[in-house]
Structure formats: structure tokens, C-alpha cells
Image (tube, rainbow, N blue to C red):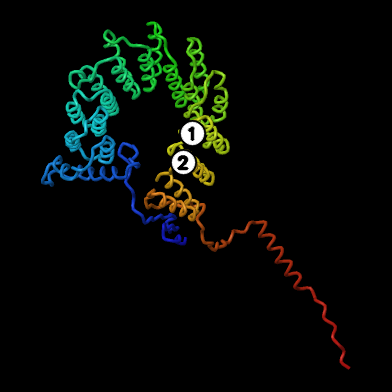
Amino acid sequence: MSLDAGGAIALRCCSEQRCCATPTVSSPPVAGANGTKPFEENPEENRVAESLSSELLKDPDSEPLPLPQRLDLSFSHITVTPSLILNTLNISPDAGRGIIDLLKWAKSRIGFKPTDEVYSYFVDFFGRRKDFKATHEVLVNGHGIAGSKCLEALVDRLVRAGRPAQTVALFESMEKDHGFLRSMDSLKLIVSSLCEHGYASYAEKMVKSLSSEFFPDEYICDVLIKGWCVDGKLDEAKRLASEMYRGGFEIGTLAYNAILDCVCQLCRKKDPFRLQSEVENVLIEMERHGVPRNVETFNVLITNLCKIRKTEDAMKLFYRMGEWGCYPNETTFLVLTKSLYQAARVGEGDEMIDRTKSAGYGDALDKKAYYEFLKILCGIERIDHAMSVFAKMKEDGCKPGVKTYDLLMGKLCAYGRVDKANALYKEAESSGVAVEPKEYKVDPRFVKKKPTAVKKEKKRETLPEKMARKRRTLKKLRLSFVKKPKRMMRRSY
């Protein structure tokens, strides 16, 4: 195919049935390692953060001066802020222990006093690297200042690193080692974090061992039941629920929603046809104990129905939410929109987007939500409708990212619509989004093939065809012996 005017992007069909995209612009800075957005509001701060990151990533053995002195020489004129530190940490995932020197240097700056939130940035950074010795050093450095945010970051990183025993032991020693207060709130934080990641057995043992000091309330009971459900152990969740009822506790909607979700997941995995009957049993038990349904109850049901492609049943449940005094939230709208698009009911999907906006949840339609819509539409071969949703995305003020442009350009190239892919690339270039050069596969259905001459193979003659041919030949032979009439010759006088 021909090169686009201006040379912005070269798209061609190769002999290997691929479509190549070769941009000619440089890439902007990427987002942080933990997925947070770069600080686009302050370009100057971004530039300083990149300079700090380059210093942190240098080999300390090859530098004549230690890192704090180099930072003093190069950055004596800047003002250290929490956003600058966070931005620097986000773009320096490989800096290692040099980050501790950054903390010491920042503390020495005039006018900067690190807070609990600033220390939590460093705790999260080292926890992401599973370097908990450095995390301990940061907390010792911030003793007396580090508080609830640091504790939350530390517990989250310990649990996500797969260290539940160390998390449980933290509660006993955290007041002595780090100055964190042992209270009911800190216990709830640790228990909920353990249960969210499926370590309900550790959480239950911890709660029972501390029951004489911190007697569990209904929230802890609900969270423990949820933890067993997250781990997929429905029998343990029911066992704990019956123990709670015998002990005089009331099980709340949170626990029943977790049980309901666990039942739905097990049914989807083993026997989807039993889902409706098992769900009815849980809902009847909720009514028998006087536990009201809330919007999360309906979200659990609608989400699991959509996962087994029962979109129509999910829509019926959506329209009946008002009978229980519940109204949909952003999760309900997003799940139904994706399910409608997946079922190729694109018109109803567009209507659901409009309903989301009219219900006041327009903020939920962010870049990530629109990308999921576009991915589904491209997956079901509705590229034209995907382009219309893409236009709606820009109208709503959502700035498309690299993944969105890459998805649409790849699908357009697969359909052989290179001109539109070129236009998308120019749009990305003008808006400052860098699309990496890569090869896009062209769908074989849309590749123009050269017509090839088909050689006719001689077929073997069947017996009826052979007999018919012989009859025709004999007829010709018989007719050849018939005397033909001579033409009348003119008399010569």
C-alpha cells in the first residue's frame, strides 16, 4: 500500500501478511512502575524527578562522591515536595537501597519535614521490592512520625508478598519496634488485609488468640467469613457463620454477599445449571435471618450472570432492583454495559452508557472503562461501532492512551483499512501520545490474492458416460454411410 502523505506513518502489506507501522517521533516519559499517573500538571517537577532518578540509578562504585553530596551539588536550588518524591520513586523502580540516601537528603533540606504520608511512599517502594529490611530501616528512621498510613502500606505489602505469619507477628511487636499503636483499628486493618488475600486461617487464629484483649465485633466476624469465601472454602465460611450465630453475633450483609459470591463462583466452575437454585437458597436464608439486600448483593448476582453469558437474566434483575429499595451504582452499569457489548447488543450497550451518565456516575466512565468497551467491540468484529464509542470517549473528555490507539490501529490494519489507521496515528502524534512501532497482522480474509489459473484435471470417465460417448460415436459412423443428395448441376447447352 502507498505511503501516507507527510511520512507520518508507513503502513504496508508485507509478504508475510503483516502491516507495519513506523512512527517517526520520540516517546514521552512513561508512567510509574506502580501504575500511578505521572504528574502531568507540573512539567518542571517532572523534569526534576527525571534528573533525580538518573542520579539514583547511577552505579555508586563508579562515582567519586556519595549520593547525598551529589544531590547537594546538583539539586541545591530545588524545593523538595511530597509530590516530587512520589514522582521520583515511581520512575525509579530499580534504584534499590539508594532510595534511603534520597530520604536522608530530603530530611536535610531546609523547609521540608517528612510526614507520615511521605514515609509511607518509601515503605511502599521497598515493600514492592520485597526488601523488608530496608522497610524496617525506614520505619526506624521515622519513629514517632510514621503512623497509620505507614502501617497500612507495610501490612499491604507483607500480605501481598505472601508473608501472612510475619504480618500476624507484626501486631505483637509493632508498638515496641515502630511506635504503632496496638488498637482495635490496627487489628481490623491486619485482619481485613489477610482476609482480602485469602489468608482467613491466619486471621481467625489471630482473632481467637487476642479475643481476651480485643473482643471481636460484627465487622471482624463478617470479614472473617469473607476471607474464607475469598479462599473458596464455603464449608469453612458456613461453619464460622454458625459459630457466630451460636455466640450471639449477627451476620451482616457483607458476609452474606461474600457467601453468595463464593456460591456463584463454585457453581460456575462445577455446574452452572445449579447456580439459580443455590442462589435462591442463600437469598432465602438472608430473608429468614432478617438481613436486607443492598446494591452489592445485586452486583454479585449480575456480575456472575454476565460471566456465564446470561445477559437477559441480568437485565431482568437490573430492572427489579427497585423492588428491594436498591438502586444501581457505577459497578452495575459498567458490568452490564460490557455484557451487552459482549452479547452484540451494541445499541443497548450505548443506552446503558447514557444511563450511567444520567444517573450521575459519569466519572466512572474513565479511560480504563472505555478501553474495556473497545476491547470487547474489537473482539466481536464490530470495529465501526468501536470507532463510534472511541469518538464518544473523546467527547466525554477522556484522553485515549497508548493502549487504546494501539488496539484500534491493530484492528484497522487487520481489516486492511490503512487510511483510517494512518489518521489515528496522526491524531495520537498531535495529542502527544507515542505509539510504538510494531507489525500488525493482516487478517487473511482481507488480503487481496492474485488470481491463479486453475489447471483442469482429467476426470475418470464413469460407465454411463462411457456408454453415452460410444453411442454418439456409433451414431456418427452410421450417418457417415448415408448417401448425401448431390446438388443440381446446371445444364450446359
Residue extending farthest to the right is 493
> How far apart are the two marked residues, 2 and 1, measured between alpha carbons?
11 Å
- Where residue 203 appears, as percent x and y from the top left, is 30, 17
Q: Is residue 97 visible?
A: no
Q: Which residue is mark 2?
A: 397
Q: Is residue 2 above or below residue 334?
A: below
Q: Which residue is mark 1?
A: 362
User: Viewer-proximal residue, 77 or 139?
Assistant: 77
Q: In the displayed structure, does residue 66 sit left or right of residue 414?
A: left
Residue that appears at 33% across and 48% down: 28
Rendered-image quadrant of the C terminus: bottom right
What amino acid is at disc 1?
Gly
Residue that appears at 39% across and 48% down: 433
Residue that appears at 29% across and 43% down: 46
Q: Residues within 10 Å of mark 2 (few under 14, many from 20)?
A: few
User: Viewer-proximal residue, 469 or 84?
Assistant: 84
What amino acid is at disc 2?
Gly
- Where residue 117 appears, as percent x and y from the top left, is 27, 29
Q: Is residue 201 above or below residue 405?
A: above
- Where residue 252 appears, as percent x and y from the top left, is 43, 14
Q: Are marks 2 and 1 in contact (CB under 8 Å)?
A: no
Secondary structure, mark 2, is: loop
Secondary structure, mark 1, is: helix
Of marks 2 and 1, which one's residue comes earlier in the chain? Answer: 1
Determine which quarter of the picture holds residue 170.
Answer: top left
Q: In the displayed structure, does residue 385 sit left or right of residue 493?
A: left
Mark sitting on residue 482: none
